[in-house]
């Protein structure tokens, strides 16, 4: 678990803002979650982050009947950013902006759950599911980054946009490493959660292939090889091997 937090902490301060992220006991009954019966947008994720950080709202969990629907909504593929981001009938600009508006608060939620898990709270399953969801949103944004940049070729602030997209790619590389590492943490995560993260990492890999450098591939390959050697579970061993080989040999996942 310690290495995962080192990876997450290595991301830029503006993205993780570790010093500012803490969870307080809920004290104001009037503070509410964004509605679970409506598709969320970027504003919904930002509202949840703000209410957790500043208002003491408890993080939604699957074990709490009252907050389970909120958590399930949080990671629903039908939420607006992901649904619109994957809709090829929409303009590249609209798709990119919707995804971009949600990625930062989703990542902040990942950090909030990671912080609470590090403190020993039973949020490992929520953390696993949310990391897989972030991988989907991040992958969709990566796929649109170059098409989006091409629409800005005549913009006077073109280099500013280039720098911003470069930072997105750096953050994505760091997050992907954290996702893969978390999938190997069998002392923290259940087998089903580990398999969920491995599957999520594989599903998103074609979008991450272009931004992973040789150092990334070596680290991930070594980490996965170590876990393959350590595990005696044949299903886990097969899943880890598939992920390792797909990363190492730059294969496109089936």
Image (cartoon, rainbow, N blue to C red):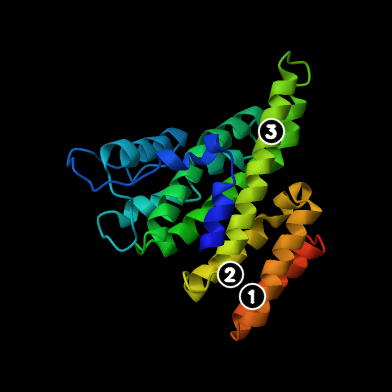
Location of residue 239 in the rendering, given as x and y in whole percent from the top left corner = 65, 74
Label 2 – label 1 distance at C-alpha? 6 Å
Which corner quadrant of the image does residue 40 belong to?
A: top left
Q: Is residue 88 visible?
A: no
Residue at position x 66%, y 36% in the image: 167
Left or right? Give the position of 25 relative to 80. Answer: left
Q: Are marks 2 and 1 in contact (CB under 8 Å)?
A: yes
Considering the image in quadrants, where does the C terminus appear? bottom right
* Residue 229 visible at all: yes
| Label ID, residue 184 | 2
Q: Which mark is residue 227?
A: 1
Distance from label 3 to label 1 (Cα)?
33 Å
User: What residue is at 66 percent from the left and 62 percent from the top?
Assistant: 202
Residue 104 or residue 22, whichever sits in front: 22
Pair 3/1: label in front: 1
Question: 43 or 4: nearer the eye?
Answer: 4
Q: Which residue is mark 3?
A: 165
């Amino acid at each position: 678990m310690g290495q995962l937090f080192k990876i997450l902490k290595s991301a830029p301060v503006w993205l993780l803002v570790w010093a500012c992220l803490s969870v307080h006991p809920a004290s104001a009954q009037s503070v509410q979650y964004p509605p679970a019966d409506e598709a969320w947008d970027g504003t919904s994720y930002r509202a949840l982050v703000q209410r957790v950080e500043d208002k003491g709202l408890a993080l939604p969990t699957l074990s709490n009947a009252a907050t389970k629907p909120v958590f399930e909504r949080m990671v629903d593929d039908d939420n607006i950013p992901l649904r619109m981001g994957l809709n090829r009938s929409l303009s590249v600009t609209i798709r990119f902006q919707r995804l971009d508006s949600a990625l930062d608060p989703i990542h902040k939620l990942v950090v909030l759950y990671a912080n609470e898990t590090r403190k020993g709270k039973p949020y490992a399953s929520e953390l696993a599911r949310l990391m897989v969801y972030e991988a989907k949103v991040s992958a969709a944004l990566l796929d649109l980054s170059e098409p989006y940049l091409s629409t800005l070729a005549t913009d006077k602030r073109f280099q500013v946009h280039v720098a911003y997209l470069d930072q997105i790619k750096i953050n994505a590389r760091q997050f992907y490493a954290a996702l893969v590492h978390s999938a190997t943490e069998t002392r923290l995560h259940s087998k089903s959660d580990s398999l969920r993260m491995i599957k999520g990492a594989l599903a998103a890999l074609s979008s991450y292939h272009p931004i992973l450098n040789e150092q990334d591939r070596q680290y991930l390959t070594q980490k996965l090889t170590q876990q393959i050697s350590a595990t005696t579970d044949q299903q886990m061993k097969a899943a880890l091997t598939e992920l390792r080989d797909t990363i190492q040999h730059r294969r496109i996942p089936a």
